[in-house]
Amino acid sequence: MATVSLEGVSKTYPNGVRAVSGLDLEIADGEFMVLVGPSGCGKTTALRMVAGLEEISEGTIRVGDRVVNELSPRERDVAMVFQNYALYPHMTVAENIGFALRLAKMPKGEVRSKVEEAAAILGLTEHLDRKPSQLSGGQRQRVAMGRAIVREPAVFLMDEPLSNLDAKLRVQMRTEIARIQRRVNVATIYVTHDQTEAMTMGDRVAVLSAGTLQQCDVPQSLYDRPANLFVAAFIGSPAMNLYEGILSDGADSVRLGEQCLSLPPGLTSLEAWRGSPVVVGVRPENLHDAAGQGEPAPGRALEGDVELVEALGSERLVHFRLEASRLHGVGVAGGAGSERDAADLGRGELGAAAASVGVARVEPTSSIRGGERARFAVDVERLHLFDPSSGQAIGRH
Amino acid sequence: MSGQAIAPAAASEAAPTGGGGGTARRARRSSRRAADRRLGYALVAPAVILLLAITGFPLVYNLWNSFHYVNLSYANVPQHFVGLSNYTRMFTSSSWLASLERTLAFTAVSAVFDTAVALGLALMLHRRFPGRGLLRAAILIPWAVPTVVSAMLWQTMFDPRAGFVDYFLGIVHPSWGSLTWAGASVLRSWVVVFIADAWKNVPFVAIILLAGLQVIPTEVYEAAKIDGATAWQSFRRMTLPLLKPAIMVALVFRTLQAFFVFDVIYIMTGGGPGTSTETLSFLNYQTFITNTDFGYGGAMSIVLIVMALVIAGVYVRVLRPEL
Amino acid sequence: MTGRLRMRVVVRETGFYLGVLVVIAIALFPFYWILRTSLESDGQVAAGVGGKNGLLPSHLTLSSYVNDFTQQHFLTPLVNSIVVALATTFVTIIVATLAGYALARLNIRGAGAILGFVLLAGFFPVLAMIGPLFLLLKDLGMLNSIYPLIVIYLVYTLPISTWLLRNFFAQIPRELEEAALVDGATRLQALVKVVAPVAVPGVFTAAILSFILAWNDFAFAVSFLETPSHFTAPLSIVTFGQSQFQVFYNRIDAAVVIISVPIAALVLILQRRIVSGLTAGSFR
């Protein structure tokens, strides 16, 4: 067992592509750290550098107090679960799980008992003598896990281990992996592009974009206090609504088109943006059907033209349009929901994202219908403000 | 729980490397990468050296011989430099020019005919149907047996007394019941050679084309069907264009093979009647082994290699995108 | 309408299966015929009644086979061929496996050029090699020996085997090897314990191909081997039955059957593997 630390770790490929740059991360002993980001953000490269499968261009990686930069994978005491599992097709389940132990010259009886122990944890006991080709997708996934836990390594590395499973099995294995990780209590780095996996499994989550770390925090903080536009748009589903607005001279309200939202007291250091454009973020779940709750106070409501209502049973998603763009001539594009849009945000392409469309998540009893004008109550305490040029969150701490 | 058992040696080996050892670290890293590459070169070396020796030595030796008089039949005449005379002798030799003409004609006919037939076979093999395994085995056997077998087998077939060709022809017309083939006339000799050669070589060409067919996604055909294409249209508009790389490879492969034709000629006709079925390779054999004229033969070989290189160059260029 | 459509399908399917039958007949009937001829007696062949007797043989006799082994001493060339083909296959597999692995996996500079050269060597005209090799073997006193053929035949077997194994190794997921490295294997252990076992089918296909190609040679054998006891089997057959004025096809064909049977058996058992080995990765 050990901690893992990455200090200023970068990866530059011979063709000049910089996959990871200046990554600093500290994973405590027993901690479940999730690396999340859109495809191509460098998360898998970072993982492979920890594993020793990829050379480190700059920086230092430590496992425990050992610098492992120059060590081969076998010397690093890490175990890895691959995206396609990489089970050895010519070996039985038992042989797959015990392979590392046999390589380490562990006595046969001991290998056998360790393998059986791991198989029991994973519910693979009946399948020990089968070949991987005779197993279902979920069972293969368990064998891959078994191969990792039987080692009792210093670090677990998992590269999108659930992406090849169907949706139902994925949810089931999600909790199972988390359970097993708690049980063996080994520092774990888990790579995924799925924010639900990241939020539900990680003790902490590191959000990566274009090779750089955007924010690393516990899941709730990522949701409550996204450090920048990229994280704001990436975490949460449906994604946060982002609008371009103007901060009032008193820094106590923000104007969206012809509407105005008052800001809660306690926001700090907004002086630099007085009377200037800012990006306002409102999560769909912080917009409510105003009709249900009596007339909201002035400055705590938004009106919009409803385009479409999606009834999901437990809730309704109201897609609406604000006039926010009329004043500023901000281009209208799709909502900032998809991975691509999130990636664009990371690169500061604000114009496209600060569109006038939006989504509200309302009660299933709401009577809002498409084609009407609707009024939403806004939890202004949960508004997010961002600097439009840097994309950084402003007004908090 | 601890991973100590896995890598104790490594732990002691490289424990305290701080920020200071930058150059040493870089040196070790590059040496590891270099070691990897050295392993790579060490592993390919035997193959490259062996092939270089087996083909490079004859190439160089032939080149040297081609500018010299080297004839073992006249041992009293010493080897000496003769300049380009072996080449001028060859380019003015009517037998060499005639065999070049024959070889090219045989090559062209074989390459086109065999590839066309092979395409049909490949299409058959590509389809799933009961008995596909039998068909596959049936066409692999002619390819797998020695050329000697295909030559001897067809020689038996075409023999007026032992064979079945005349037996069947005799059913069609009584006067065709006892035709002689190999050696009887120039045309008949070529027919026999051509059939034996095609029978042996079409299967492999079909397998090359089958490989090409297998990488065409079936969705393409389904989309074409939905777009209203008939079977012929989808063959003409989808299969043929998508199969073009494979057809090119098959054509050039078969072209080279036919261009070097030797075994069937030697066994079935011995170059006859007269010299009418002598090909470039056969002439080269005679010059080396029968006449032991290694200077003149060397010149022939060099020209044969140059011609092969021209064709093989096309082959490699066709394959390049796949490398 | 539907009736006509069904008619058309029936006609097309019948045509297809007829075509398949014709192909199988063309491929296999000649083998039946030589088998039939090989079971005839010298007398029948001398009398020239062979083909005139119809498709079925009249009197079956093994005399041609007996003659081949007793009078023609066919066993020696057969053994020679087996020795050479096995030895060539053995060398090919070792050399081509190493090279194929390196070309597929070890990021060596110029891998493309090396592979190009290996393929090109496979197209070196055989008849352009025999002159210099004849002189070399003569100087070494190794003309009329089967042993140099073991090395020379590599020009047939190495290019295609290396190409095939390179493609095969390239298809094995890289993660498999990486998993072994992470599991604590050295590069060599990963190769021996994980990659090699997974590569067995590919190696096997390359071995069969090499054996067939080495077994099939005629050109080198006819150029370098001089006395019947040193012949390979294919060369030996050509000299059979050509005594006097009579060609004894029964004796030739008995030998043809003998050298075809092992190859045909191999192909029949392993046809699926051979075809998939030859087609895998060649256009990907």
Image (cartoon, coloured by chain):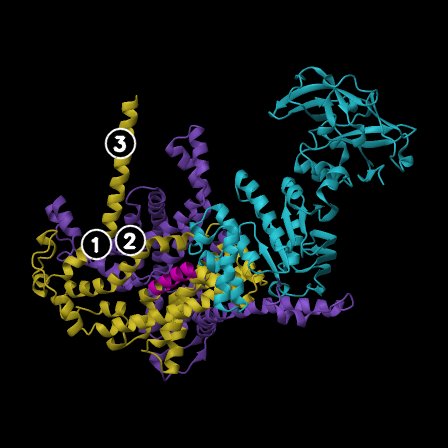
Chain colours: A cyan, B purple, C yellow
Q: Which residues are magenta?
A: C200-212
- Cα distance in 3D space between marks 2 and 3: 30 Å
Query: In the image, which is nearer the foreground, mark 2 or mark 3?
Result: 3
Residue type at mark 2 is Trp
Residue occupying image coordinates x 89% and y 34%: A273
In depth, the one of A72 and B5 nearer the eye is B5
N-term-proximal mark, 1 vs 3: 3
Left or right: A397 with respect to A112? right
Residue type at mark 1 is Pro
Q: Which residue is mark 1?
A: C30
Residue type at mark 3 is Val
Check if mark 2 and mark 3 are on a common chain: no
Residue occupying image coordinates x 59% and y 56%: A80
Label 1: state its secondary structure.
helix
Q: Horizontal and vertical percent for residue A216?
A: 74, 47
Subunit of label 3: C
- Cα distance in 3D space between marks 2 and 1: 10 Å
Q: Horizontal and vertical percent for residue C141?
A: 36, 83
Q: Main secondary structure of the magenta part?
A: helix
Left or right: C251 with respect to C123? left
